[in-house]
């Protein structure tokens, strides 16, 4: 006992007090460095970003790819965002989320969706945004051209045999619904923009049968902002053309024009600003579009 | 006896505190997982800025480009883009220079473009001839 006491006093150390101090010190040290004064975050990698910031990063990668078409570079950049997943699925998810969140209001939003889709679809990715905003065919801006009245049809010469006049048709101005054609019966025949200060931001839809005659009574649906839509019918302005209908766009938005169940390819048009010459003056207005559909010939 | 215990406790505290601070700031720092873009490492921030500049080439929407750069949290986004562009020029980062210069030009206007950047301006596309 004496010798044991002698050892303890000679070292002057209380081991349990030392251990307690060590534990307390360690705890205080970690609380201080993890909670009170943590390391300033400076060298974060893309995979450590929040979901929103990761989405921003993926969008930037897609837009960059749309410009440089360097798929290897895009894949490398995406791997930095999501090292443990199929990067194309990640891009598809981002596109899908943006559509679900309604980030499809402006032209820029639509271009983002298209850029994302152009990145993931050729690589086998797939998601809920597939094909929602197809890239429109190249559009040439042309100055407004005057619309000529339709060529009058020659009246057949009077027959020698008198014909019994039939009953006078009534309600000539009413829209006569045509028999419903089969799905995919119409194809996009013309998609062309024009710039006319007198008709700013108008989609002029014309529906023709296989012979080129206007078809009234066809429903036309225009969708925008992802979930807003309007349906109207051709033939309500017979003074224009039998198969004519129009729709006014708001500047800066994108619109998809379709004939429900009748076409497989629905074009998307953008209400961009455009400049038209009026006399010596240049006027800024909103781009309008001719969108014609024609029945497929059997 | 009490002095010895207090001394040991203080020594333990000192050693524990030092070890805790060393571990917490050194090998085991806080690992962030929900970081904003402003916390990205500089090289990723620069890459992100370049991608935004390339995106501007696609959509020509300068407001959208600025909106995309804002989360980087720079005190002055435009100054940051100009500085980065100047750095790319000094480093002869040939692929990046024209797109960054185009972004700077859109941000500050062609008349305010620094002289060195004028050399790298993309050739303007001639305006289409109008008819009628």
Image: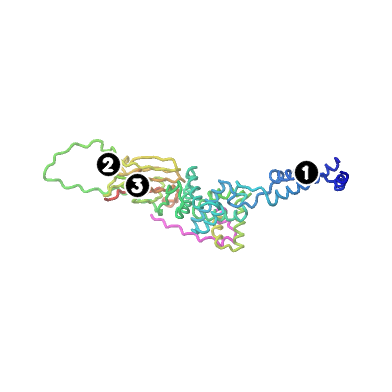
Question: Was residue B131 drawn as part of the magenta stretch in this picture?
Answer: yes
Q: Considering only order in the chain, which callout, 3 or 1, is on the residue closer to the N terminus?
A: 1
Q: How many neighbours does mark 1 have within 10 angstroms: few (below 14), some (14-19), or many (20 or more)?
A: many
Q: Secondary structure at mark 2?
A: loop
Q: Which residues are magenta?
A: B105-132
Residue A104 x/y as whole percent:
47, 45
Callout 2: residue from which chain? A
The answer to whether dots 1 and 3 both sit on one chain is yes
Q: Which residue is mark 2?
A: A179
Callout 1: residue from which chain? A
Q: How many neighbours does mark 3 have within 10 angstroms: few (below 14), some (14-19), or many (20 or more)?
A: some
- The label shown at residue A263 is 3
Tell me: residue B53, above or below residue A19.
below
Q: Secondary structure at mark 1?
A: helix
* Residue mark closest to the camera, 1 vs 2: 1
Tell which of A206 and B128 is nearer to you.
Answer: A206
Q: Considering only order in the chain, which callout, 2 or 1, is on the residue closer to the N terminus?
A: 1
Question: Was residue B118 drawn as part of the magenta stretch in this picture?
Answer: yes
Residue A240 x/y as whole percent:
31, 44
Q: Which residue is mark 1?
A: A21
Q: Residue at x 74, y 49 (%)?
A: B19
Q: Is residue B81 left or right of residue B59?
A: right
**CA–CA distance in space, label 3 to label 2:** 16 Å
Q: Considering only order in the chain, which callout, 2 or 3, is on the residue closer to the N terminus?
A: 2
**Residue A199 shows in the view:** no
């Amino acid at each position: 006992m004496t010798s044991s006491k002698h050892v303890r006093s000679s070292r002057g150390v209380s081991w349990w007090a030392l251990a307690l101090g060590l534990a307390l010190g360690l705890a205080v040290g970690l609380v201080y460095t993890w909670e009170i004064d943590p390391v300033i975050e400076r060298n974060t990698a893309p995979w450590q970003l929040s979901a929103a910031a990761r989405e921003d990063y993926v969008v930037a990668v897609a837009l960059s790819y749309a410009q440089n078409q360097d798929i290897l570079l895009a894949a490398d950049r995406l791997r930095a965002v999501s090292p443990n997943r199929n990067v194309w699925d990640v891009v598809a998810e981002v596109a899908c989320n943006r559509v679900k969140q309604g980030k499809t209001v402006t032209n820029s939003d639509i271009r983002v969706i298209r850029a994302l889709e152009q990145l993931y679809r050729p690589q086998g990715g797939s998601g809920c945004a597939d094909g929602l905003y197809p890239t429109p065919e190249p559009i040439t801006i042309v100055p407004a051209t005057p619309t000529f009245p339709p060529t009058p049809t020659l009246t057949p010469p009077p027959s020698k045999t008198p014909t019994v006049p039939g009953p006078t048709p009534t309600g000539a101005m009413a829209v006569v619904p045509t028999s419903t054609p089969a799905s995919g019966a119409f194809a996009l025949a013309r998609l062309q923009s024009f710039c006319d200060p007198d008709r700013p931001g108008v989609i002029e839809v014309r529906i023709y049968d296989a012979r080129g005659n206007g078809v009234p009574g066809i429903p036309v649906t225009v969708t925008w902002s992802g979930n807003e839509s309007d349906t109207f019918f051709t033939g309500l302005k017979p003074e224009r053309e039998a198969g004519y209908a129009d729709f006014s766009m708001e500047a800066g938005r994108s619109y998809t024009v379709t004939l429900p169940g009748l076409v497989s390819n629905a074009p998307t048009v953008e209400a961009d600003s455009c400049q038209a010459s009026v006399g010596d003056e240049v006027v800024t207005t909103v781009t309008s579009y001719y969108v014609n559909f024609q029945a497929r010939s059997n | 006896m009490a002095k010895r215990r207090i001394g040991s406790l203080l020594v333990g505290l000192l050693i524990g505190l030092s070890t805790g601070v060393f571990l917490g700031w050194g090998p085991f720092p806080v690992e962030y997982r929900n970081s904003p873009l402003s916390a990205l490492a500089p090289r990723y921030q620069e890459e992100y800025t370049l991608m935004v500049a390339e995106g501007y080439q696609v959509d020509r929407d300068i407001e959208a480009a600025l909106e995309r750069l804002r989360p980087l949290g720079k005190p002055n986004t435009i100054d940051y883009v100009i500085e980065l562009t100047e750095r790319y020029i000094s480093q002869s980062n040939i692929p990046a220079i024209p797109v960054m210069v185009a972004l700077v030009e859109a941000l500050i206007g062609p008349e305010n473009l620094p002289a060195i950047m004028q050399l790298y301006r993309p050739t303007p596309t001639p305006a289409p001839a109008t008819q009628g």
